[in-house]
Image (cartoon, coloured by chain):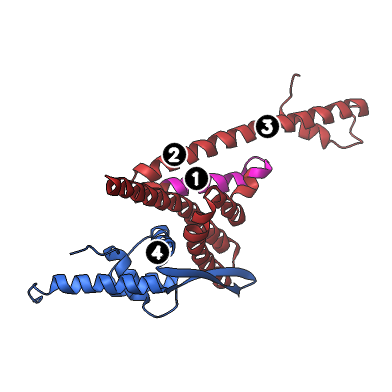
Chain colours: A red, B blue
Amino acid sequence: MDFLNRHDYVVIMKADPNDESRPPDDNRERLKKELEELQRRLNRQARYAACVSVTLGMVAMLWAYFSGQMAVRILCTAALCMSLISYRLSGPPSKWIRTLARPRTLELLSYILLPKARKEVFEPRYNEILEDYVCAKKKFDSKWEIRWLTFWFCVHTVLLIFGSINARFWDKLISTVSKLLRLR
Amino acid sequence: MKLPTLTHLQFAVLDEIGAAKMSGRELRARLKKNRRINKSGPAFYQLMSRLEEAKYVEGWYDQKIIEGQMIKQRHYRMLGDGIRALNDTRKFYEQRADGLPEPA
């Protein structure tokens, strides 16, 4: 299908019905269908782009977390959160990206942890952060203040998930090595 | 002499809990203030999870509601095995410290 510029479609669809240059109704229906197809295509492209960027971001953050310094970890997490939030504010209309930057969704992300690790390592600290966030929201209630607080809450939650994986991993490794040494 | 079962960090945590019931946040704050032990959140709770696994402490959640949001707080108290291990470790350190000169 040969696509026109998206802007042209919008101009045609919004055209005045009394205008003589307006296309006839059967053309209008066809254009409407084409516009929907174009919209679907754009959504699909945006979804792929979002998938790729978030996956790359996650991989970069994992790499940075296990090998880099604290500053690198924070920068990577902040970059990822910024990309998610910028998608949410201005970007593609894919629903999953819109919901990904919400605190509730980030809490869902913690389900990648094993149940015991989630209950004993992640949740206590998460609830402390949540308490701070809720108390701060009570104090600062303008739109941008809440956005700022939510942004940092998201950053801390993501850091906490990786911190929990890290703490669990090293603890298990050390206990396994010490068991092996004891066996010898 | 037999080595103690507790690491110095576990000893500090159990000593700080003592006979009290304490929230994780309060315990971390006390460790930081009294002993200058500054662990990150996940590392601290992993340490507590290990102590729970060894039955030295018991942990449970208390719930409170702030601004319509339910917040769960993890609390800890020491168990019998923890008190025994703490006393053994304390004895060990006292015996080892007997021959050492007094700090200036």
Q: Residue B51, which numbered label?
A: 4
Residue at image mark 1:
A80
Q: Which residues are magenta?
A: A76-96
Position of A86 relative to B82 (above/below): above
Say which chain tag 2 marks. Answer: A
Task: Answer whether labels 1 and 2 touch (C-beta < 8 Å).
Answer: yes
Q: Using the numbered discs, state the Cα–Cα distance from disc 1 to disc 2 in whole angstroms.
A: 9 Å
Looking at the picture, tell me which residue is in the foreground, A110 or A94: A110
Q: Mark 4, chain letter?
A: B
Q: Earlier in the sequence, mark 1 or mark 2?
A: 2
Q: Position of residue B39 (x, y in %)?
A: 35, 62
Q: Which mark is residue A158?
A: none
**Residue B16 image position (x, y, % from top left):** 34, 75
Residue B70: percent from the left, percent from the top? Answer: 61, 69
Query: For the residues tagged 1 and 4, is the chain the same?
Result: no
- Foreground: disc 2 or disc 4: 4
Above-or-below relation of A103 to B87: above
